[in-house]
Image (cartoon, coloured by chain):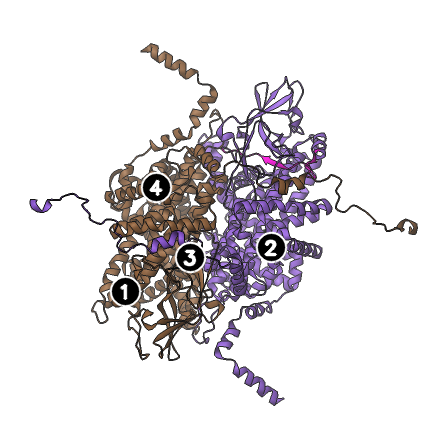
Chain colours: A purple, B brown
Amino acid sequence: MSNIQNRLEAVKQQLSPEQEYQNAVDPIRSMNEERAKAAFDIRSLTYLLDGGEKNTFLKEKIMQELERDPLFKMDDIFDLTTSEVRERTMAKFRSMLHHLQNEPVDQFKKRMEIVSLVDPGFWTRFGVHYGLFVGALQSNATPGQLGYWFERGALSLNNFVGCFAMTELGHGSNVPGLETTATFDEASDQFIIHTPTLTATKWWIGGAAHSATHAAVFAQLIVKEKRYGTKCFVVPLRDPKTYNLLPGINIGDIGKKMGRDGIDNGWIQFTHVRIPRGYMLQKHTKVSRTGQVKEPKLQQLTYGALLQGRVTMVADSGHVSKKALSIAIRYAAVRRQFAPSGANGIETKLLDYPIHQRRLMPLLAQTFAMLFTGTEMTEMYNSMMARLDGAREGDQDLDEVMEMLKETHSTSAGLKAFCTWNCLSTIEACRQSCGGHGYSAYTGLASMYQDFAVQCTWEGDNTILTLQLGRYLISSYREALNGKKLSPGVGYLNNLNKLIGKRCNAKTLEDVLDLDTISEGWQVVCAHVVKNAATEFEECLKRGLNADDAYEQCSQARLYAAKLHSFSYLFNRFADAVKKTTGSLHTILRKICLLYGLYTIEENAGAFLQFEYFTPAQIEFVRASVNNLCKEVREQAIPLVDSFNLTDYIINSPLGRKDGNVYVHYFEQVKRSNPQSEHPYFDRLIKPLIQRSTEENDYEEELAGLEDDDEDEE
Amino acid sequence: MSNIQNRLEAVKQQLSPEQEYQNAVDPIRSMNEERAKAAFDIRSLTYLLDGGEKNTFLKEKIMQELERDPLFKMDDIFDLTTSEVRERTMAKFRSMLHHLQNEPVDQFKKRMEIVSLVDPGFWTRFGVHYGLFVGALQSNATPGQLGYWFERGALSLNNFVGCFAMTELGHGSNVPGLETTATFDEASDQFIIHTPTLTATKWWIGGAAHSATHAAVFAQLIVKEKRYGTKCFVVPLRDPKTYNLLPGINIGDIGKKMGRDGIDNGWIQFTHVRIPRGYMLQKHTKVSRTGQVKEPKLQQLTYGALLQGRVTMVADSGHVSKKALSIAIRYAAVRRQFAPSGANGIETKLLDYPIHQRRLMPLLAQTFAMLFTGTEMTEMYNSMMARLDGAREGDQDLDEVMEMLKETHSTSAGLKAFCTWNCLSTIEACRQSCGGHGYSAYTGLASMYQDFAVQCTWEGDNTILTLQLGRYLISSYREALNGKKLSPGVGYLNNLNKLIGKRCNAKTLEDVLDLDTISEGWQVVCAHVVKNAATEFEECLKRGLNADDAYEQCSQARLYAAKLHSFSYLFNRFADAVKKTTGSLHTILRKICLLYGLYTIEENAGAFLQFEYFTPAQIEFVRASVNNLCKEVREQAIPLVDSFNLTDYIINSPLGRKDGNVYVHYFEQVKRSNPQSEHPYFDRLIKPLIQRSTEENDYEEELAGLEDDDEDEE
């Protein structure tokens, strides 16, 4: 035995210092070290995040199918031109259609969730037809109309691709202000769809440039010279046999965008285009043969479906953050930079730097908060919609349903805004944390930013959405003062007496490290900022402003209240979820939740100090605790990222490789994407530049025959 | 007369309501309204910002020259492929070279400043040779060596283009950790340049892929098996007659990036490449024929030149912010959305919404702060360099010069970091403030973000730079305690007794609206956070950590101190500049400076409350005052943007049109960039998809001959 040991020792000694060094810094080994630290069952956390084992298996099945689908090849996407991306995106329709028609709708929804992580441009382009166009039919068509369009191929894509023509060059947020007109012509029983001005040009219409045969057009209904507001009309755009534009239709390509170039956004101008009266979708407002217009009493009942998109975006912000953090954290686990003295030149992992932990760990915690809140938000939406779908005018519980609708609307508005902002900042922070390599297209974070950025604008501009929540908070506050019992999300406003002026009653500094204390702290500051916003609003009313103007004047206070309310909401949903867990999973999740709570308090320290919930000493302790928690969560960072369970194919970044072998794969990717070739323009551009005659002198003094007699004059 | 008036009246009455509406919302008219509000002389502000009338005229001359130079056509840049951008970028070399050789260096610097706004990719590619390569020669070559390389064409681009090969795949921030070796071979009197590992591959080397004949290579000097650290060597890469790679050189293209695709970044691997001993640049370290190495005593004297880049980036952050805000603010002056009741449908300008003022006016104020600070920073750098260039070992004033170097180094590190971060956030905020149109490539803000993002990483990763400043603040604090008189920028640390614990002595809330009070407040919070960081550092030392580890452990405190110090610095430089102005210029600039000061206090309210400089009531008043100041500055927003004096060509965005005619030009740009054409892939992709047989059913139950007898069994 000792002989063998000696020989092993000898072999070991034969390693050159260089080889020993290479072993020590080997990225695969570095990654394995991290993975071995797992203090909880990774698989259990995956099941929890996915909503159960069954969902995890389903996701894994879908990830494998996508990876093996040649149309979904993604590692060469970074170098495609806009036209190439457009074509490839269209080509993916066929396999997606296959799944749509052959699997249960819930399964297909999971597929789309994963597709949105793989190829957000395709997700949108496909969603334009099945989400927006078909959704517009379902929300606005009578049952008969729905049947008609489905028979015409709207569901099966049979000689039919739809698009959704709402926004115009001059109008985005203000839908009632759209300029396109739909004038009823009683003589022919037709509507005339018309674009009266340049700014009325339909703009940003996904699918219009190259895909759509029909559009759901939002236009001002005009009957007998009276305007009835914006309604929805189906307008044929192209001959499905040839894709030639129909008479009166003018369409162009919107062209290059910041991201999502796979979507063929277009502009549309209608010039006196005639459609049958029946092409107006008349589930709500009806126009009869003789031009009698019948409007619905409960317009609000139609708003529910519009919330779907923003509800989904809360969870999506969590999913995209998972992807970004998988890259940044895995890279930080193997990237080494600077060797401390006495380390034999072995450099330190980025993840071991306190400042790097500070950059990434709070964002990891925030991601968990968004994921748990996304699940909660989806449930809230589904139960609201279940009630709303059955609701009819005159129902006894209509008020209650309307309250649910209002709460879901406002909560989702705020969360959509702050979660998409959070996610966009997370992507950029992850990108910057990868140093120079974050600027390479092939490491994936640049395009992730460019693709995601639009989420802050569409489905409601974020700033405007925060103001909607702010308005709801003010009106809830006023209702609470009048004794009304509020919905759960704003229930704390029923406890104003207890909350206003309340200070943290932690006896020791350590008592601050408690989920319930943090939760109370958030309720207190939220109560204060909502109260301040409401007071500012009341003062505007007293100064004689009408309600709308008063709301505008206190918009900054509304935004601030909405921000703190949404952060509080995220923390509380996270804490709720943590409380349902046990064992080692509970231990790690509680730690992450604590980090999230304290980090957001630190970020909003001004509010916690201004309303004196915490003392300066407590805030200083919060800062120190965030440092400590970052260090603790860092120990589990790789197991946590592993629990996100995204395959290398989905992550599509060599820096985010599960095996840690980042440099080899990054170099391979760069070489594969940029094969060495003949110099593309040496003869044409460089040679004439650098091999020009040295005698050349642009401003050579030459008199060109002129006899200059300056000398004589002097 | 009255007859004519009557007729005019009649004509006026003939305007249809539609025409009257169109007049009221006409963007050109809206812009003119704003311009007419100017309460100061726009031209005088331009002169002030440019540093004098002469500079303004020079800039205007250069802007016109660029606009008329066909190679600098920029309005089609958004749709070029990476290879097309690369070629066009190379083509621009010739006209730039012409100017470089025929105009005074100061004038050429102004030209480059403007070029960096027009085409940042070209600016970098050109700068790689003249800034980085020639700069490396100037910093590291002996006079004789400099003469040699200039004679060989390094200055005139005569059979010569240089690149700067510092970073490697595995090392960016840690330059002393670079792996490339330069081993002296005494027998041949040559160095052998070698890439020993994959991670030693030179990476991100601008100009390497297609431009450079020579590289300034940073490699580990090894003589007689001893390592002497990273030195600089000139290594020929290509035959300048053919551009074929030289033996032992392997170069590839790094390919697609987030932005600046005009730069041909490449990777380089050296395989035992031999160069003469004289190709090592030996201004500082010298290697003799017999392998004697002589190292310099005062290495620091060589650092000055490295600061140039980051000093420039402070002002650049201001310049790029000017461009972004010109677009966002001009668009907000003509874009209308939502009509209040009683406005006859005339919608409100975005700029009139308090929340929109809140989004843009503080950023406008911050831009002024960065511009004035940039000027100051450049002067500080120049006077430091003037002293440093003449400095020799043994000089009596060497300590003083070293102090200047340290201060310039640390101050520029912090300002580079926070100003580039500020600018990047400003671009994104401007982009989002344009709503959906901000996502179009043609409105210019997307590419501005993508091009600028790299500034947060190169010339020193921002986070690392903030830590350098943090370290300087801690050591300055300790020196101050020991009675040393500090440099002006950190002079407040000599007044710790007065500052620590000081509260604002404003008698009324209104007294807070004072530049000196704000300045004092910043000094107080800075003194506190620096003290806290230093205390944390001391505690780490007491726990037995060495200084380096102790600095790592308190890195979050360092970053926080650096942040507040830099914001304070920006405010104070702005306030200094304001105090030098008079009249109506003073009135508006003082207002903007007040807004900047109060806005940054609001953003950092936690610190001002924690250290009890302001009371909660004062902070509440600060918030309200920011609202009011945003409203006041908004009144002058267009004249202020006009004072930036960027032409439509430079701004290169239809939304930023000076005449306000945004929709017409935006539509024209989109149409010009995307001419209507035959459908690119209908026959190939769409027709087979939507005209497939309706009988098709992927999972049609078909037994294929199998006789299934389930029925019998049941």
Is residue A142 shown to the viewer in this render?
yes
Confirm whether circles 2 and 4 share one chain: no
On the image, numbered disc 1 is attached to which residue?
Answer: B146
Whether A164 is among the magenta residues is: yes
Badge 2 amino acid? Ala
Q: Which mark is residue B210?
A: 3
Confirm whether circles 4 and 1 share one chain: yes
Dot 3 crowding, Cα within 10 Å, few <14, some 14–19, many 20+: many
Please report whichever mark, 3 or 1, sits nearer to the chain's N-terminal start. 1
Badge 3 amino acid? His
B24 or A38, which is in the foreground?
B24
Identify the chain of the residue marked 3, using the numbered disc in the image.
Answer: B
**Left or right, residue A256 beside residue A112:** left
**Left or right, residue A218 beside residue B48:** right
Residue A332 picture location, percent across and down: 51, 63
* Residue range (magenta): A152-169
Proximity of marks 1 and 2: CB atoms separated by less than 8 Å: no
Residue B315 picture location, percent across and down: 33, 51
Residue B180 picture location, percent across and down: 42, 70
Identify the chain of the residue marked 4, using the numbered disc in the image.
Answer: B
Q: CA distance from mark 3 to mark 1?
A: 25 Å
Task: Between label 3 and label 4, give the one nearer the viewer.
Answer: 3
On the image, numbered disc 4 is attached to which residue?
Answer: B67
The local secondary structure at tag 4 comes to: helix
Q: CA distance from mark 2 to mark 4?
A: 58 Å
Q: CA distance from mark 3 to mark 4?
A: 27 Å
Q: Quadrant of residue B286?
A: bottom left
Identify the chain of the residue marked 2, using the numbered disc in the image.
Answer: A
Please report whichever mark, 4 or 1, sits nearer to the chain's N-terminal start. 4
Residue under the image location 31 percent in, 45 percent down: B514
